[in-house]
Image: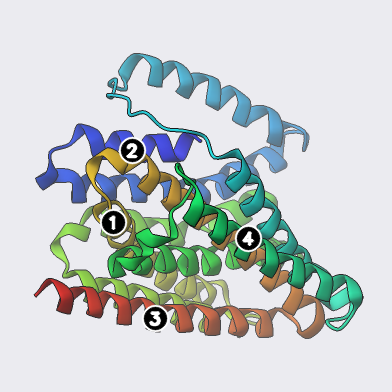
Amino acid sequence: MVMPASLAITVGVYPAAERGAAVAAWTAATGAAGVIGNLGGGLVMQYLPWRALFGVPVLLAAVLAALVAVLVPRMPRHAASLDLSGTVLLTAASVALLTGIIEGPEAGWGSGLVLAAFGVAAVLFAVFVGHQLRSAAPLLDPRLFAAARLRAGTLGVAVTFFGLFALFFVNARFLQEVKGFSPLLTGVAIVPLVIPMIVLSRLAGRFARRPAVMAGLAGNVAGLVLLSFADGDMPYPVYAIGLVIMGTAMGLCLPVLSYEIMAALPPERAGLGSGLNSATRELGSAIGVAVMGTVMTTYGMGAGYRVVAAVVLAGALLTGWWLRSDARGSA
């Protein structure tokens, strides 16, 4: 709820010529937050009881809420209806899909539980689409995805966070259990990911749209492949190269992809674009964690990284194709 509102406000308070830079700054801040969370979590685990992991964010949220109340400008409101049925259907379908992925290794991919989970997910997603097409006030009208740039933006964001959170899922365990890092050092060790991401996000407006996206998604694949060779003998500086590559890649592509989502919709639907951006990130992240955990449980961390890299590569190729189609259609 917070992230969609923040992006909608960011887009709304800037003139059209400056919105690309504003979205880039927003993207840099939200991407960096995940990495800073790793660093902050390491500090908490090093010096405070583990329960403080839940208490510290509450204090930070209270401070930020006060700052928002004072500093954030008011935006005009647009009438909107809450599609409760669509929300329930989409949530249930996502839960069923994740259940099938997570339970596959333990229960067996041919087990009744897993097959039922995937079957229920497919049915619920189909029912959700049908409901949205009939609804007078849909949660997410599927017809919007006729726009190639909206399809490209949502898929590109999804696969980028798919790869990023697959990394987050195993990074702390690898550095602490295999490399012997302390919680604090583990938090510090993720910093090479965030610096290039912040720097390049701020420069995103200077890059051509499609080359930046393709270079960023390709960099994500390369970083994941490099990290797939990580083991106890790999020196941390080599491991950090993989983090730098992924941070650079996200700095190149995420601002452009987020802007593509927002620009594909009219200004009065900025809330929908922002919500779609955030939902895509969260769904991609959840599936990335589930897939990484599933593959790693059976075949090991290296195989998990390579499967994740393959998914990101497939998404990158489709994203690039859609961006090219949009460019041809606009010419």
Secondary structure beneath label 2: helix
Q: Amino acid at mark 3?
A: Leu
Which quadrant does the C terminus fall into? bottom left
Q: What number of labels is visible?
A: 4
Badge 3: few (under 14), some or many (20 or more) residues near its Cα, within 10 Å? some
> Residue at coordinates 67% horizontally, 79% vertically from top-left?
304
> Residue at coordinates 34% horizontally, 73% vertically from top-left?
216
- Cβ atoms under marks 1 and 2 closer than 8 Å: no
**Residue 309 place in picture, x, y as percent:** 53, 81
Which disc number belongs to residue 201? 1
Is 1 left, or right, of 195 in this rendering? right
**Residue 302 place in picture, x, y as percent:** 66, 83
| Residue identifier under label 3 | 318
Which disc number belongs to residue 8? 2
Distance CA(mark 2)–CA(mark 4): 29 Å
Secondary structure beneath label 3: helix
Q: Amino acid at mark 2?
A: Ala
**Residue 62 can be seen in this image:** yes
**Residue 180 can be seen in this image:** no
Distance CA(mark 1)–CA(mark 2): 18 Å
Badge 4: few (under 14), some or many (20 or more) residues near its Cα, within 10 Å? some
Distance CA(mark 4)–CA(mark 1): 38 Å
Distance CA(mark 1)–CA(mark 3): 23 Å
Q: Amino acid at mark 4?
A: Val
Secondary structure beneath label 1: helix
Q: Earlier in the sequence, mark 1 or mark 3?
A: 1
- Cβ atoms under marks 3 and 4 closer than 8 Å: no
Is 172 left, or right, of 267 in this rendering? right
Is 79 left, or right, of 234 in this rendering? left
Q: Earlier in the sequence, mark 2 or mark 4?
A: 2
| Residue identifier under label 4 | 127
> Residue at coordinates 72% horizontally, 62% vertically from top-left?
176
